[in-house]
Structures are given as structure tokens and as C-alpha cells.
Image (cartoon, rainbow, N blue to C red):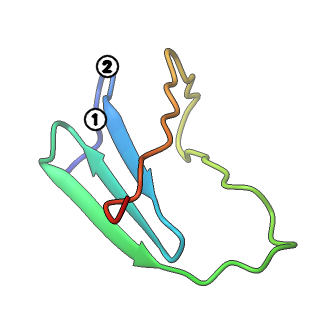
Amino acid sequence: MGPHEGPLQAQVLVDRTSLELFANQGKVSASFCFLPEAWDAPLEFYATGGPVSLSSPVVRELVPAWN
């Protein structure tokens, strides 16, 4: 898939040991497994090839399924 022009809607789900990214309303997705340590750096986002701005970020804490 080539470069994207214009606004891009992305959803990032972060769990204790995984990160999932969905972009273009699910047309592009990626899943990553990780085991963070307590002293690890915070989650960071960056782009290559041009400027990017983040607008209207929303952070939600999910309720565990076993409650």
C-alpha cells in the first residue's frame, strides 16, 4: 500500500503485553507482542517522510472482561 494523503484515522489498542494498530478503518493493521519493564520509556509515535500532526486524541481505559 502506498503513501496516504490527507487525514488518517488510527486506533491503537495497548494491553499489558500487546499493541494493535488499525488505520484506514481497518484496511491496514499490525499487531505487536512486547513485555515492557517498569522503567521502559513511554509509548511514542513518529513519522518519516514529512510532517505529521495529532488532532483529537482520545484515551480510554477498558474494563477487564473478568469483572
Quick one: 36 or 4, which is closer to the camera? 36
Q: Which residue is mark 2?
A: 6
Distance (Cα) linking label 2 and label 1:
7 Å
Q: Residue furthest top?
A: 56
Q: Residue furthest left?
A: 27
Q: Is residue 37 above or below residue 22?
A: below
Q: Is residue 67 above or below residue 5?
A: below
The reply to whether the C-beta atoms of the residues labelled 2 and 1 are less than 8 Å apart is yes
Residue shown at the point (33%, 70%) measured from the top left: 31
x and y percent of residue 37 in the render? 76, 80
Quick one: 57 or 15, which is closer to the camera? 15
Q: Which residue is mark 1?
A: 4
Quadrant of the rendered structure where residue 41 is? bottom right
Classify 10 Å Cα crowding around label 2: few (below 14), some (14-19), many (20 and above): few
Left or right relative to 18: residue 38: right
Q: Secondary structure at mark 1?
A: loop
Residue shown at the point (30%, 65%) measured from the top left: 30
